[in-house]
Amino acid sequence: MRIPIKDVTPECERAEVAGWVHEERDLGGLTFLLVRDRTGILQVTIPKKKVSPEVLAAVKEASRESVISCEGVVKATDKAPGGRELVPETLKVISRADTPLPLDVSEKVPAELDTRLDNRYLDLRKPRVNSIFLIRNAALRAVSEFLWDHHFTQVQTPKVVAAATEGGTELFPLAYFDKEAFLNQSPQLYKQMLMSAGFDRVYEIGPIFRAEEHNTVRHLNEATSIDIEMSFADEKDVMKILEEVVSYAYEKVADTCSNELATLGLNDFEVPTAPFPKITYQEAIEIASKKGESLTFGDDLTTAAEKVVGEEMGTMYFVTEWPSSTRPFYTMAFEDRPEVCRAFDMMHPRMELSSGAQRCHVHSKLVEQIKGKGLNPDAFEFYLNPFRYGMPPHAGWGLGAERLVMTMLDLQNIREGVLFPRDRHRVSP
Ligand code: ATP
Ligand code: AMO
């Protein structure tokens, strides 16, 4: 019976494994095939004079990245990875790989990101690249686990919608029979409506679509957003959930992904400790201005400002009390100084990870705020109605899954953390 390569130990007498030919070395009388599956790499040693002609013929046919299976005797040796090797009695080529390969999976020949993404099925076979997705899996599982433990209900909201939510980024229009429709930028309006529907605490991990104009290393056109919304809560309550969920995700990755972290060379992986420091927007622009990134009240934090404030903070932190003019219509303003609102961003020193706020839950005020942003309340009727028939105060946030992974693993480009990224120039594969 086939077993995972990680379970082939020097103590096994015999083993059957299957996987891809990672590398091939011919030393005259001896041929070595390194066979890789999702759990590791095994050296298969073929003493040419001692194996059957069938095995020899199969070894000849087994080009790099072919899928093979083999069965034979396991021997201890310090010369092979993992301190063991397999000498095959049978060896079969299940699916032969053409030559030459469009991409070197053993990473001896480096490739540009574009070439890697064009041949993503091969790129993902690289243990280093694969590790990113195993860690992403662990992090998102931890997020779900934490929210489940805190009584959040997982929901799925529509991705085909009729209205924009986030000012500032463009929508992707859609051919939807005879109606005007778009791909959703955020579950924002739906998660808020669910507060009126009595769900109390919801979360969603799903795609968001943004027609970002420029190509940057931290923007995607299709991203994954981790969203929560919580009733009878203010911005401080949801900031607490956010710092705790992010720390928990790091903690779980540290606990369960030590091999993957080692594969990525992240031996000094640090878990951030909640609570994270909080500074107001006013304090943030003062820090930025002192460091030569001059900003005045009402300006968004520029990429350069995020960078210098991040350097000063040196850890994850929150920026609170934003100018109302910089935030979307659904944000609650402070009663006594309406030019400032109950919004926050959670920042990694490198970039913004999350935005959130306490929401305006008073129908008449919300209508005013929609008009104040130059939008037509009629277009938001489906969203506004729940505010007329019993809406609790509520707050929430959206956390970019790819930015979480990118900053956690110190990836240089956000695309590295997406299986099949969508950007300005890429809709395939
Ligand atoms: P928001 O939170 O406003 O929806 P975001 O999450 O994209 O947007 P950031 O990525 O933190 O926010 O953007 C911070 C700054 O980065 C912006 O003020 C702007 O200077 C710059 N920026 C934002 N989007 C882009 C873009 N698509 N291309 C280039 N620069 C951008
Ligand atoms: P915001 O627009 O700030 O807020 O988005 C929340 C988080 O989602 C991630 N993100 C992106 N990641 C990659 N590429 C993109 N183009 C992209 N756009 C956003 C970021 C960002 O911090 N409705 C609010 C959330 C809320 O208030 O609940 C919202 O969408 O990490």
Image: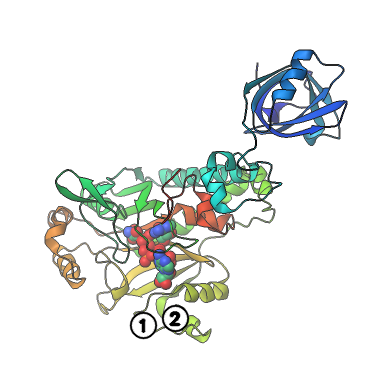
Q: Amino acid at mark 1?
A: Phe
User: Foreground: 84 or 324?
Assistant: 84
Instruction: Quarter of the image for the N terminus: give it.
Output: top right
- State the SS at label 1: loop
Percent position of residue 281, x then y = 41, 76
Residue at numbered disc 2:
285
Percent position of residue 258, x then y = 66, 45
Q: Is residue 110 left or right of residue 393?
A: right
Does mark 1's beta carbon lie closer than 8 Å to ligand 1? Answer: no
Q: Is residue 88 above or below residue 368?
A: above
Is residue 280 visible in the rendered image? The answer is yes
Find residue 399 and report its image quarter. bottom left
Q: Is residue 12 above or below residue 273?
A: above
Q: Amino acid at mark 2?
A: Ile
N-terminal of the pair, mark 2 or mark 1, is 2
Is residue 248 visible in the rendered image? The answer is no
- State the SS at label 2: helix
Q: Is residue 104 left or right of residue 422?
A: right
Percent position of residue 68, x then y = 66, 24
> How many numbered callouts?
2
Percent position of residue 191, x then y = 28, 51
Residue at numbered disc 1:
297
Mark 1 neighbour density, 10 Å: few (under 14) some (14–19) many (20 or more):
few
Do residues under tags 2 and 1 come within 8 Å of each other at their CB atoms? yes
User: Foreground: 219 or 58?
Assistant: 58
